[in-house]
Image (cartoon, helix red, strand yellow):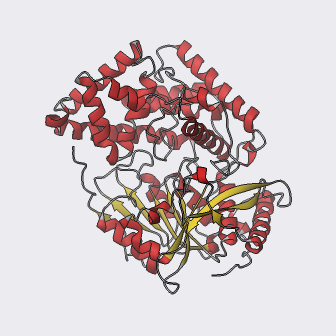
Amino acid sequence: MRGTRPKRRVAALGSAGALVTATLIAGAVAAPTANASAGSGPGQDREARGAAIAAARAAKAGIDWQDCPADWNLAKPIQCGYVTVPLDYAKPYGKQIKLAVDRIGNTGTKAERQGALLYNPGGPGGSGLRFPARVTSKNPLWANTAKAYDFVGFDPRGVGKSTPISCVDPQEFVKAPKMDPVPDSEADKLAQRKLAREYAEGCQERSGWMLPHMTTPNTARDLDVIRAALGEKKLNFLGVSYGTYLGAVYGTLFPGHVRRMVVDSVVNPSREKIWYQANLDQDVAFEGRWKDWQDWVAKNDATYHLGDTRDEVQQQWLKLRATAKESPLGGVVGPAELISFFQSAPYYDSQWAPVASVFSKYVAGDTQALIDAAAPDLSDTAGNASSENGNAVYTAVECADAKWPTSWQRWDRDNTRLHRDHPFMTWANAWMNLPCATWPVKQQTPLDVKTGKGLPPVLIVQSERDAATPYEGAVELHKRFKGSRLITEKDAGSHGVTGLVNPCVNTRVDSYLLTGKLDGADVTCAPHATPKP
């Protein structure tokens, strides 16, 4: 399940009937040699050498910064360019691909500048190109950091403007209604398995040449080439959600290249969790956060009239689900589309009130508001292409990063058992990931994330009740990265903490990025303000 922000208009469910929007980076210098010892075996050594060659080449070439193309919707003074990287780092002189990057210069003086801050928002499959807009939009949370750093965004390999991949026609991809993710029979499961297999075949057919190389370690190597192309000796990095795993892998492969690193809402980097178990863990956490939202809705029954207990709100949800299953709302919004819309509430506190408001209108007799919110917009061809691409990258990276169970019996047993107590997301998440069971290219063994020579202290930020990246992931990375500090936002569960107003967190993130200083011990912060109805 993806860890980037769900798209609002597109009820983006894949051809596998699976949720897309659910879930789940000083003058030009030659690049230092990559830390080959972090990997394992001769393949890793070859790739480490390839990464060093590519970085040295990029440092020499730099980036030809220009005004951004009009259709990228990135206004001046943001500039855009490309960095060339090898498709396969074991063959650095072989086929090359282009990665899109953008930047805005630091807002402070030349003396205040501390280099470039690179950003990855998650996914896998999320675009980072909106990052410099935090400066042009005068986002107050980032004003201090912007004085010191150029804000640099990029589309990872396969994403958006960076040699994008695809698995299915985008208009087909968003068509609704999809099958109800919760199966009623063995025949339903068989139909979903067929869709998942066809989706994997579509990825091979449309993007097969890229699939073996769509891995997190390769994206981490790309990150190092971008660092070199920017003329930066060391990397400053902010990663959110899947971006934390990208940061963890980068820190393992290139420990001596890290200057400052903030990871926010952490993917559990344990080899045992990447990626099958991580998705099962999400299902449990989503159920918990779904209940938190229902409690809040019940507390604000005077506004929403959906029931004054969690059970009453849940009954309204089950009634809505049953109605949409029997006869999709507006002919297009069935249970799958409802989950795609409603899941944004357990993801982000900022969605608590909007989702409750649409639900409230529906119960009061206004069905159209819910149809408008949850149905795909077939006229939004650019948005639909972006959703399809995001899902293709999500699938390609998670399927290639690790070996997945191929036995349907195991998938069926694990998800049937979990669904009993965690019904909100379990089956939807299962179908989203099932293409990995029949993935057509070799699956790798995840990197052993650990502290290497030269790795500086990393700042880890995590809310206690995060649904998309459960809290244990932050604890695990904290153990693996020696000298790291963990800030816990207690009694909170919004995904992506550094973007929220919470001075206890904000001042520490600023302080670390500006001075490198961390607290002497881990810190627990009170939660940010609860949403108002």
Q: Position of residue 51 (x, y in %)?
A: 75, 65
Residue 98, compared with residue 432, is above or below; it is below
- Give the total of numbered labels: 0
What residue lies at 27% left-to-right and 41% top-to-bottom?
353
What residue lies at 49% left-to-right and 21% top-to-bottom?
177
Nearer-the-camera pick, 24 or 145: 145
Which quadrant of the figure has residue 193? top right
472 vs 150, left or right, is left
Residue 321, compared with residue 374, is above or below; it is above
504 vs 194, left or right, is left
37 vs 405, left or right, is right
Q: Position of residue 192 (x, y in %)?
A: 57, 21
Which quadrant of the figure has residue 460? bottom left
What residue lies at 37% left-to-right and 72% top-to-bottom?
508
What residue lies at 67% left-to-right and 34% top-to-bottom?
167
Which quadrant of the figure has residue 154? bottom right
